[in-house]
């Protein structure tokens, strides 16, 4: 007998696509109902007290709480014939960084409100973004966002790279200097140059002064999209969350500029998410770039693509290490001109050559 429903009706891959959106909406509902704030006041809340406090419909509220337990936003336990709830594993992860969670949800809400078909056919988008930013306010917003989300890439770099032998570092696209200033503070022998758009100068110089690092950290204005060289010579050039915004051709141009600006034996360090290591992360951001015309096609890359680019420019000793705590990985390559290689990695770090 022929089924009246198509085979996709019960296809697991279809539901894998749908459930990602459902979990996001469940998370959003906990934020909008201020559930994290309730659990800041008490560790455990009785079911009907929770439903009454949030002004939920009894039946729908019970279903919602059951879903939150099922997806580990809450954990359920019984006491004296009553049901109580406390934060689950996912709640501890997301609610623990509540400000960042709210920011990310709002940002992705904006992305998901865009009409894909209309956009593909040339309609204007609701939430446009331009690079370089159009005015000082948008620039400030961009740099503040980059600074606020810098903890994980900093941790990834710190896990893997030994800065003790580094004397001169160039941080390309370094935001308002959060990453460079962090490592300069930790390593008194390190001199850092922050390369960013000219409009970011006031933000960066203020951060440098506030950190008391004016003698060792400086600002270099420039637009790497139009520039052909990086001024100066360095033994480490860092691209932290930069190359993943641009196509392979632009990345190739920037890595050639880095090779030319490195001292013999110096290293380029790329910290970002790679398609072969963080496919979900890469897909989400690649989708976002559909709506921002200034960014190019095919921004996120396989680590092997970088190997090909780096070797084409003369780099060798290429290695990749995945962060233990996030979606970031750190890829390094050496400008080796037959000099003794320095100890770039901590002894406990296991590096992996890219096949």
Image (spheres, grey):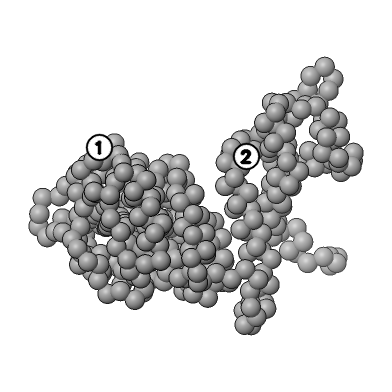
Q: Nearer the viewer, residue 331 or 128?
A: 128
Q: Secondary structure at mark 1?
A: loop
In this view, 103 is above or below 292: above
**Disc 2 or 1, which lies upstream in sequence?**
2
Instruction: Indicate the quadrant where residue 290 lies.
Output: bottom right
Left or right of 100 in this view: 268: left
Residue drawn at 35 percent across, 55 percent down? 205
Residue drawn at 21 percent across, 52 percent down? 168
Crowd tier of the residue under label 2, counting other residues whose Cα lies within 10 Å: few below 14, some 14–19, many 20 or above? many
Q: Which residue is mark 2?
A: 95
Q: Secondary structure at mark 2?
A: helix
- Residue 45, given in percent of the width and then of the height, sits at 76, 27
Residue 115 visible in the shown view? yes
Q: Which numbered dot is residue 347?
A: 1
- Residue 263, given in percent of the width and then of the height, sits at 16, 59
Are discs 2 and 1 less than 8 Å apart at CB?
Answer: no
Q: Nearer the viewer, mark 2 or mark 1?
A: 2
- Residue 341, given in percent of the width and then of the height, sits at 15, 50
**Quadrant where the image shows the C terminus:** bottom left
Give the spatial CA distance, label 2 vs label 1: 35 Å
Residue drawn at 59 percent across, 53 percent down? 104
Residue drawn at 57 percent across, 66 percent down? 287
Left or right of 196 in this view: 60: right
Residue 350 visible in the shown view? no
């Amino acid at each position: 007998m022929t089924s009246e429903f198509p085979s996709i009706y019960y296809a697991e891959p279809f539901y894998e696509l749908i459930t990602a959106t459902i979990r996001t909406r469940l998370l959003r509902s906990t934020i909008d109902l201020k559930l994290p704030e309730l659990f800041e006041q008490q560790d455990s809340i009785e079911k009907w007290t929770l439903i009454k406090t949030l002004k939920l419909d009894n039946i729908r509220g019970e279903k919602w709480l059951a879903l939150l337990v099922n997806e580990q936003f809450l954990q359920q336990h019984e006491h004296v014939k009553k049901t109580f709830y406390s934060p689950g594993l996912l709640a501890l992860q997301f609610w623990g960084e509540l400000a960042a969670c709210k920011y990310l949800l709002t940002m992705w809400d904006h992305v998901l409100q865009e009409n894909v078909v209309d956009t593909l056919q040339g309609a204007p988008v609701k939430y446009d973004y331009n690079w370089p930013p159009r005015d000082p306010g948008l620039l400030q917003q961009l740099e503040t966002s980059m600074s606020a989300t810098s903890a994980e890439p900093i941790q990834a770099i710190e896990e893997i790279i030994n800065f003790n032998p580094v004397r001169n570092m160039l941080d390309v696209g370094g935001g308002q200097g959060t990453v460079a200033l962090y490592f300069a503070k930790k390593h008194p022998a390190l001199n850092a140059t922050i390369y960013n758009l000219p409009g970011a100068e006031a933000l960066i110089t203020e951060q440098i002064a506030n950190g008391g690092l004016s003698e060792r950290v400086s600002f270099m204005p420039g637009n790497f999209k139009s520039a052909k060289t990086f001024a100066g010579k360095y033994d480490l050039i860092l691209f932290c969350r930069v190359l993943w915004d641009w196509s392979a051709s632009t990345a190739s141009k920037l890595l050639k500029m880095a090779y030319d600006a490195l001292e013999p034996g110096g290293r380029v360090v790329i910290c970002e998410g790679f398609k072969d290591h963080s496919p979900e992360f890469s897909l989400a951001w690649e989708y976002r770039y559909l709506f921002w015309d200034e960014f190019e096609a095919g921004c996120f890359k396989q680590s092997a693509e970088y190997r090909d680019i780096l070797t084409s420019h003369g780099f060798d000793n290429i290695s990749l290490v995945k962060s233990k705590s996030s979606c970031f990985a750190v890829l390094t390559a050496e400008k080796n001109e037959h000099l003794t290689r320095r100890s770039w990695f901590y002894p406990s770090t296991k590096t992996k050559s890219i096949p």
